[in-house]
Amino acid sequence: MLLEILGTGCTKCKLLHEAVLKAVTESGIVVEVRKVEDIAKIMEYGVMSTPALVKDGKVLVAGKVPTPKEIASWLVA
Amino acid sequence: MNTRTANAVLVIALIGWWFLYGALACLSRFAGSALGIEPASRMGASLEFLLFEVPKVLMLLVLIVYGVGVLRSHFSPEQTRRILSRFPEGVGNVLAALLGIATPFCSCSAVPLFIGFLTAGVPLGVTFSFLISAPMVNEVALALLFGLFGWRVAGLYLITGLAVAMLGGWVIGKLRMERHVEDWVMKVRGSTDVPDSDLRWVDRLRAGVDAVREIVGKVWPWVVAGVGVGAFIHGYVPTGMLASFMGKDAWWTVPLAVLIGVPMYANAAGIIPIVSALLEKGAALGTALAFMMSVTALSAPEAILLRKVLKPRLLATFFGIVSCGILLVGWLFNLLLGNAP
């Protein structure tokens, strides 16, 4: 599984990154977490409001930091 | 939480808000006398102003930000883009300016929005209408204007702000400046299949709470600082002192206000209380409106961000047209209304 965090370095992008890392550690699942900061790459996903979370190329959420519960549910789904 | 409990909590909170707001004048007077404030003295006048205005403005802010937060859960930037890409210029400009009020926006997301709109086929002028309206006509500014100036000034700001956004974007569209967008922007292969969030009513109510926590949590120090400076002006600056050089008879005050306001990057929450106090001391309404608009609509940091996607000529045109629009609004109001807010 590949999780990508899209964001150009705003406060919320950092929050999302931390939340995802925490959820991954807690779940014990092997996941690659990658930060995407290049605006052209972010736009390729069609996302206009950062931060956004992408799982295996599919946008899960854009424009807000999801709750730890939501992130955990996406990890197993 | 299920829908019924959530609705019940909402109703109780609204009633509680209403009572507290109605009792605010009494409570602040009570607090004032408990603290031994002498309303007749200058210091007393300032403190009394502060004790009443800070809670009042914060309460209005909470209510309006909550309402807009709930409303906003219906308008993601992705949905806005989908709507706007369907309409031609003209209608598109009107819609873009209106949607700019409801769509979540911060100047840090101006660039992704700009690219996202253009690559999805939204015309350049329509995109600009949105970019002008979104930061200028927002719920924080409207809540403060309503709280400190009353509904008439808030309404004027809303209508003229929208007019500047609609016309400004329309003019930029007519100038056919598409080739002045940086070349890499149009090469971005944008996808438009971002999932729609399927929200229940309870989720929307929660979105309102999140909005309050995030927005009010961020702007309250600005409100307190702004009202603080306003309170000082209220107590210490003699009434009418500003009429001579910030009054309506001095035509040059409007361009001066725009010139100072454009590069400035400040929170509307901090600026509006100060402007409100200046107005009370004789500054003209049009000058004040022009200043507020230019502070919120344009700023030097935004120019630097937008330079990534706009070539200098288009960037200058954008700033020039919006400044002119604001200038006209200022003059119009000084001409029509003068010093009576």
Image (spheres, helix red, strand yellow):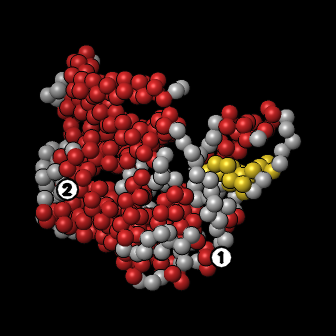
Position of B325 compared to B308: left or right?
left
User: Furthest residue to the top?
Assistant: B34
Chain at tag 2? B
At horizontal 58% and vertical 77% (from top left) the residue drawn is: B182
Distance (Cα) linking label 2 and label 1 = 45 Å
> Relative to the observer, which residue lies in front, B142 or B232?
B142
- Image mark for residue B285: 2
Position of B214 compared to A46: left or right?
left
Looking at the picture, which amino acid does disc 1 mark?
Lys
> Considering the numbered disc 1 on the image, is that residue within a helix, a strand or a loop?
helix
Q: In which quadrant of the rendered view does residue B327 lie? A: bottom left
Question: Residue B215: horizontal and vertical position, in percent?
Answer: 46, 41
Callout in the foreground (2, 1): 1
Question: Residue B329: horizontal and vertical position, in percent?
Answer: 24, 65
User: Furthest residue to the right?
Assistant: A30
> Relative to the observer, which residue lies in front, B322 or B237?
B322
Chain at tag 1? B
Position of B2 compared to A22: left or right?
left
Determine if residue B208 is in view.
yes
At horizontal 72% and vertical 37% (from top left) the residue drawn is: A73
Looking at the picture, which amino acid does disc 2 mark?
Leu
Residue that label 1 marks: B187
Are discs 2 and 1 both within one chain? Answer: yes
> Considering the numbered disc 2 on the image, is that residue within a helix, a strand or a loop?
helix
Quarter of the image that includes the C terminus of chain A = top right
